[in-house]
Image (cartoon, rainbow, N blue to C red):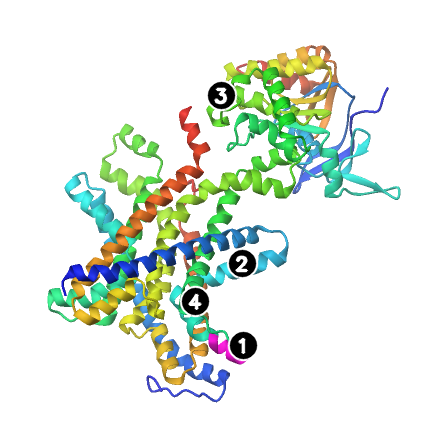
Amino acid sequence: MDWIDYLGPMLDGAWITVKLTFYSTILGAVFSFLFGLGKLARHWYFKIPSVVYIEVFRGTSLLVQMFWLFYALPLVGDILGLNMRIPPVVAGVLALSANIGAYGAEVVRGAIQAVSKKQYEAATALNFTPKQTLWRIALPQAIPEMMPPFGNLAIQNLKDTALVSLITISDLAFVSERLRNLTQESAVVYTLALFMYFGMALVLAGMLKMLSQYVGTWRRAAGGK
Amino acid sequence: MLFGIEWNTASNLAFATSILPILLIGLITTLKATVVGFILAIVIGLVLAALKGAPLKVISYPAAFVIEFLRDTPLLIQLFFVFYVLPELTGIAIPAFVAGAVALGLQYSAYCAEVYRGGLEAVPWGQHEAIKALNLPSAYGFFHIILPQAIPRIIPALGNYLVSIMKDVPILSVVTVLEMMTIARIIGDRTYNYLVPLSMVGILYLILTLLASFLVRFIDMKLPKSGIPLK
Amino acid sequence: MSEPMIKFDKVTKKFGDHVVLKELEFEVQPNEMVTIIGPSGSGKSTILRILMTLEPINGGVVYVDGEPLWHEERDGKFVPASEQHLRKMRSKLGMVFQQFNLFPHMTVRRNLTEAPIRVLGLSKKEAVERADELLEMVGLSDQADKFPAQLSGGQQQRVGIARALAMRPKILLFDEPTSALDPELVGEVLQVIRKLAEQHEFTMLLVTHEIPFARQVSDRVCFIDGGSIVEQGPPDEILTEPKEERTKEFLHAVLHPDE
């Protein structure tokens, strides 16, 4: 087999990687807002679960989380008498989302807290409700602040998808490993894999930069002054 | 049995108690891999950062490329590369632990290089100007004025990466480094009970992470940084 | 003498152990223009912030438009005000901040229409009409589509005044409105404040260091120091011939800083 022949299956694997990254990043962003805002809530029944979620999923290893969902959860199901066998893809996406969600939650929380207290005073003076203040004043100012760290998390997520190969999902890492076993051409296969991941990361970074610029239009208007 | 210790599958609790010592043996390997990986990361990172900051583009551009490449590619693949490809190229067999530590070191050297750069850039430009205005030699200025102001930002960031490295150690299980995760899988494979070993590993990591985070925060507090404005 | 629009009845305010206002007694009549002067830390901004419900009080009662502000009357007793009550009372007040506090992610026009639409329930058309009128009044009609960061400090503060006016409050609070401005921009803001004072349609409380301006527009000047009123009266009295020693010292320090 010539190295060109590797490209076919590897691109198939890369496509799976792309889809995994896409779904888990989006779901992870949802978790980030949910638990990031939850941690800032006044009521303990929102705050405590958020804090627990963030500490647990930030404090444990992603691979352990993934393996736990895939291997250990069914056993919990056995004890409870429920079928908790989840397909590898679900376990993979869930673990990835939960992980990036926990880091993202801290980003969301930090960005909202970074909004100047004076903005809240202006909102109070104009008699906005707390909900209006959050959605119309605080969040729009926090979101451009979140974009750079979120960008880094998205790329981290892309790299983390490689771990799903260990729970039998046929992503780029899995295909690479299979090809290596087949052909023993470790150097070629892994070099190709590394460059493919690198390429995907650059594309992702580019997309995020565009998103970041779109979201921060009003900030760049200041540059005109 | 593993490492000469038998486990007791009578009940989940008995099981858990009996495999704890086995897991703790793995914990030692986990800690060793973390420390060695971290040392490699901060040293290689320093070299890369220095090269990237070099005035000659012939040096700085490739250095920047290497940093970006290491940062944007998965640890798993880097590990496979070190473990399988390097022996082919050099003809020396590389033990799994070494491959694992090197891979960790490489992956995180890119992050550390960024930390060094960020910490130095955060020092206000006015400090450099003051050094020039007072006619101080630049080497003196760098070591006695700039660096002391950069370090309070660099140390906590490096500390956070230390914790991250520890959480990435389970990936080394794919080349069967005998850290906690590998052991949990072996026990699981042999007893078909993954729930107990994996849960215990999860909890042990959580405890480790919390302890390590406290340690990092403690060191951060003890750092002399009075008067240095930190955002 | 009609009921005062604002009344501080033995109001105490503490920040931790530090007592900022000590059983303060203070009144403002409807449509009166009162300037408060005093050294920093004297509590003058705190008075405004208490009125705007940004700071709670530790003792006494504050009355706005005849009703208690931080308390509600229930069965003849005063209980701490609910959020509902605060919102009702808040609608009578408007504030202009030292740092302008405009919403940076909204255009000038939207800064003016957002609260009228979301809080007062105006239709978009009505809110825009009102906003354009106000922009005309403060002389910024051509900046309506710009973002605050594109405006000078003086322009931003004029937008801040328009934004407060858009809510049609009965009371306008100005917390050192020109202290953060470059000297050459102060005048354009003071002009707008003067226009408002001359209309006599609002009760106005102004905290400022601009003594000559205060003399021109105020009905009454209050000198505050250490949490209580030292002296108050018509501007010509207080600012030219103050009776108290502390007032004299303060005015001397402000008007002749290099002596």
Quarter holding the N terminus of chain B? bottom left
Give the residue type that dot 4 points to.
Ala
C-alpha distance separating marks 1 and 4: 17 Å
Q: Using the image, name the chain to which the residue with label 1 belongs.
A: A
**C259, C234: nearer the viewer:** C234
- Marks 4 and 2 belong to one chain: yes
C-alpha distance separating marks 3 and 2: 43 Å
> In the image as oriented, which residue stretches furthest toward the right?
C76
Mark 1 and 4 residues: CB-CB less than 8 Å, in contact?
Answer: no
In the picture, the disc for residue C152 is: 3
Decide if residue A146 is on the left or right side of residue A192: right
C-alpha distance separating marks 4 and 2: 22 Å
The residue carrying mark 1 is A82
Give whichever of discs 4 and 2 has the lower sequence position: 2
Q: Using the image, name the chain to which the residue with label 2 belongs.
A: A
Q: In which quarter of the image is residue A58?
A: bottom left
Does residue A77 belong to the magenta stretch?
A: yes
Give the residue type that dot 1 points to.
Leu
Q: Using the image, name the chain to which the residue with label 3 belongs.
A: C
Read off the magenta span: A74-80
Rendered residue at 43%/65% (across/down): A90
Give the residue type that dot 2 points to.
Val
- Marks 1 and 4 belong to one chain: yes
The residue carrying mark 2 is A51
The residue carrying mark 4 is A91
Please say if C252 is above or below C109. above
Mark 3 and 2 residues: CB-CB less than 8 Å, in contact?
Answer: no
Residue A173 in percent (x, y) is at 28, 63
Q: Taken as a whole, is the magenta stretch helix, strand or loop?
A: helix
